[in-house]
Amino acid sequence: MVGFVFAVILGIIFVIAVGTAVLNKGARVIASVVAVVVAIIAAVILVFSSYYQQSPGETNVVVNFDKSVSGENAKPGSAWKAPWQDLATFDIKNQQVVYAGNSENKSDNNGGTAQGPQITVQDKDGVSSDVDIAIRYSINPESVIPIYNKYLSQENFRQRLIDQDIRSVVRATANDFGTIQILTKRSEYENGVLKALKARWKDDGVLVESVALQEIRPPKNVKDAYAAAQQAQVQVTKAQAELEKQKVEAQQTVQSAQAQADANDILNAHPLNSQSLTQKYIEQLGKGTTYVVPQGSTPFIGAK
């Protein structure tokens, strides 16, 4: 639009130069040269004001002088418009916004810059925590013109819809969780934010791709208490494991004692005393050829 206005101004200068050349014979040559130069410059400006290059993943809304919509173009490549028309460009690819850090530290935790500071939330226990979160979303290509009609530019769209709604939903969802739940059930908190944003943007032409909680920072006293509770749980787990070990060892001892008792019962029922051994000796004498060796003698067997 600026180029078109400038071209109009040059057109006025061209008309003045032509008029001067016609009415003033003495300045005819100079006026003619000025008119030609102005005409060339105006033509170049009009051409550049009409031509534009569109990148993949973009949709351009063609806007008339009165801000009304003339049409839209979602096809990548070279394109033309009227010199007096403007373009409102919208990025319809996946986009990520990160809210992290503070006014002094604007890192997005991945080497880039966050779009906004951390979000302070309050859970249902009344505890406030600072949340770093990343949201990935995209614009429905069919909703570009309605979005333009409502916000006029993508920057306004981000500030007035995306930024405000994300902060509002992240805070509201935290009210459904206790302090320990937020710290230990982050995936449920993420899913809660994801579902709430999808419902909120259902009619706004925004598609939510993912929600990622990067970090949750509760107050120091809560963090210390949680760490102590975790350590206590570790000790309880170790004690339970030791108790189970002792139970197993006790069971093994009982089983060993029972086996020994059973063996003793068998021995008591069938004692291996001198009388029982003598009886076994006599029973064997009646089986086959038996050689009796007197006690205390040294037998000598010769072989031929």
Image: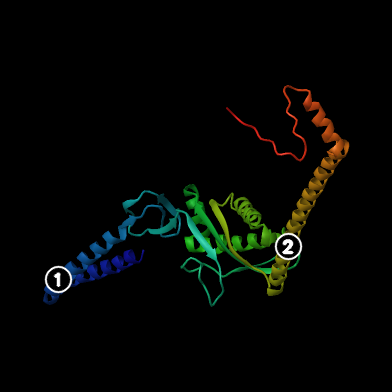
Left or right of 122 in this view: 277: right
Gap in Å between the C-alphas at discs 2 and 1? 91 Å
Q: Residue at x 78, y 27 (%)?
A: 284
Residue 210: percent from left, percent from top: 55, 53
User: Between 217 and 54, which is closer to the camera in this rendering?
Assistant: 217
Q: Residue at x 56, y 68 (%)?
A: 100
Q: Residue at x 51, y 52 (%)?
A: 146
Residue underneath mark 1: 33
Decide: few, some or many residues near mark 2? Use Cα within 10 Å; few <14, some 14-19, many ≥20. Answer: few
Residue 97: percent from left, percent from top: 52, 62
Badge nearest the viewer, 2 or 1: 2
Helix, strand or loop status at disc 1: helix
- Badge 2 amino acid: Gln
User: Between 242 and 276, which is closer to the camera in this rendering?
Assistant: 276
Residue 288: percent from left, percent from top: 73, 21
- Badge 1 amino acid: Val
User: Between 121 and 31, which is closer to the camera in this rendering?
Assistant: 121
Left or right of 115 in this view: 272: right
Q: Residue at x 32, y 63 (%)?
A: 4
Residue 268 position by quadrant: top right
Residue underneath mark 2: 233
Left or right of 88 in this view: 258: right
Residue 28: percent from left, percent from top: 13, 73
The N terminus - image quarter: bottom left
Say if residue 288 shows up in the picture: yes
